[in-house]
């Protein structure tokens, strides 16, 4: 059985992503996740853009901080590396880069 575009994208990202997020990124890039993954697809702007979009999606992984305790799905250092990779692809595609700015924080009972 041939690999689908969606499965190839999930395999390349490595970190678990919600199916809905991947589906949304594929649709936004006009790709069908059920189509066969080929060499030509792997080099296409659409696939590369979807890959970068999924990496940016990982930057939105849940992160909680309270006092001196912190729980994060992905470390800050890993997030920086993902952003560099995604922005490199966006630049190559002639698209706007992503700037995450400051990390939003939620304070409860302050």
Image (cartoon, grey):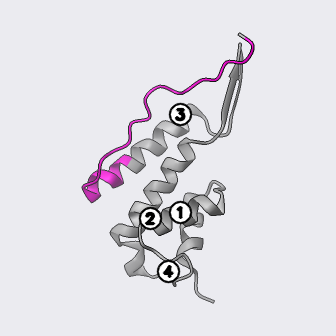
Q: Residue at x 75, y 13 (%)?
A: 109
Occupied quadrant, residue 64 = top right
Left or right of 98 in this view: 33:
right
Give the quadrant of the C terminus. top right
Identify the element where label 2 is drawn. Answer: helix
Could you give the CA–CA distance between mark 3 and mark 4, rounded to whole angstroms?
A: 31 Å
Mark positioned earlier in the residue sequence (3 or 2) = 2
Helix, strand or loop at mark 1: helix
Magenta-tinted stretch: 87-109
Up the image or down, 37 lies above or below 73; here it is below
The residue drawn where x is 62% and y is 62% is 20
Asked if residue 45 lies left or right of residue 58, the reply is left
* Residue 37 numbered tag: 4
**Disc 2: which residue:** 28
User: Eyeballing the image, is 110 above or below 23?
Assistant: above
Toward which corner of the image does residue 44 lie, by quadrant?
bottom left
Q: Position of residue 2 (x, y in %)?
A: 58, 87
Magenta-highlighted stretch: main secondary structure? loop
């Amino acid at each position: 059985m041939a690999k689908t575009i969606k499965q190839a994208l999930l395999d390349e990202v490595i970190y678990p992503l919600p199916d809905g997020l991947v589906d949304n990124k594929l649709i936004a890039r006009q790709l069908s996740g059920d189509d066969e993954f080929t060499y030509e697809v792997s080099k296409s702007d659409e696939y590369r853009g979807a890959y970068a979009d999924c990496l940016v999606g990982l930057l939105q992984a849940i992160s909680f901080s309270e006092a001196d305790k912190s729980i994060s799905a992905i470390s800050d250092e890993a997030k920086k590396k993902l952003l560099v990779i995604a922005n490199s692809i966006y630049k190559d595609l002639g698209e706007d880069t992503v700037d995450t700015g400051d990390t939003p924080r939620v304070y409860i009972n302050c």
